[in-house]
Amino acid sequence: MLANYLSIPLIGIACWTQNFYIAMLAFSAKIFVSGCNVAPTLTMMQNTVSPEDAGIVVSAYSLFTSVGKTISPLFFNQIASALGAAANPRRFGLMILIATSVGLLSSNIFMFKAGKEYKKIMTEKDRIEEMKIEIGIKD
């Protein structure tokens, strides 16, 4: 969640600077920083389903992520056209900053809720494993 908070100023720097190299450095840092939440997300999904379903869950995640990345430019283009961003390119920067900020900040809410639920599930799994060991059941 902290990575999402750190990513927003990096996007702002990248979108509002006049220096190409600073913009590329900021976007690179943003990708590096915000990319660290993918592995825990996939791990949480894999650990909360049966091993047989883990591949399906990761595939579904990849599918929906790819569909979102494919469709979002269509919506973004429509909004940019409506706002006249072609005549004023700084509007693109503002649109990118607003869109990514909303996405990153709202994802923190769901990541927090998912983390709480994941902790509950893993605590229950540990309790069941301890009970199996106590009564001598082997998997």
Image: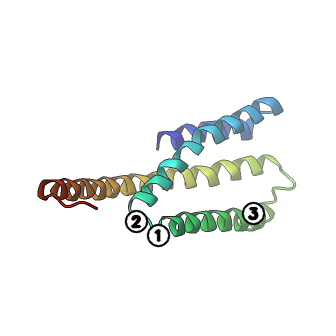
Q: Residue 9, percent across and down? A: 60, 37
* Residue bearing the label numbered 1: 53
Say which of 106 and 136 sits in front: 136
Left or right, residue 87 beside residue 7: right
Q: Quadrant of residue 25?
A: top right
Can residue 19 be seen in this snapshot?
A: no
In the picture, residue 60 is in which quadrant?
A: bottom right
Asked if labels 2 and 1 touch by Cβ distance under 8 angstroms, the answer is yes
Rendered location of residue 48, percent (x, y) = 38, 61
Residue 73, numbered circle: 3
Give the CA separation, mark 3 to mark 1: 31 Å
Report the residue at 39% width, 57% height from top: 114
* Nearer-the-camera pick, 47 or 89: 47
- Quadrant assignment for the C terminus: bottom left
Q: Seen in the image, is 125 located left or right of residue 90?
A: left
Decide: few, some or many residues near mark 1? Use Cα within 10 Å; few <14, some 14-19, many ≥20.
Answer: few
Identify which amino acid the numbered label 2 is placed on. Answer: Val
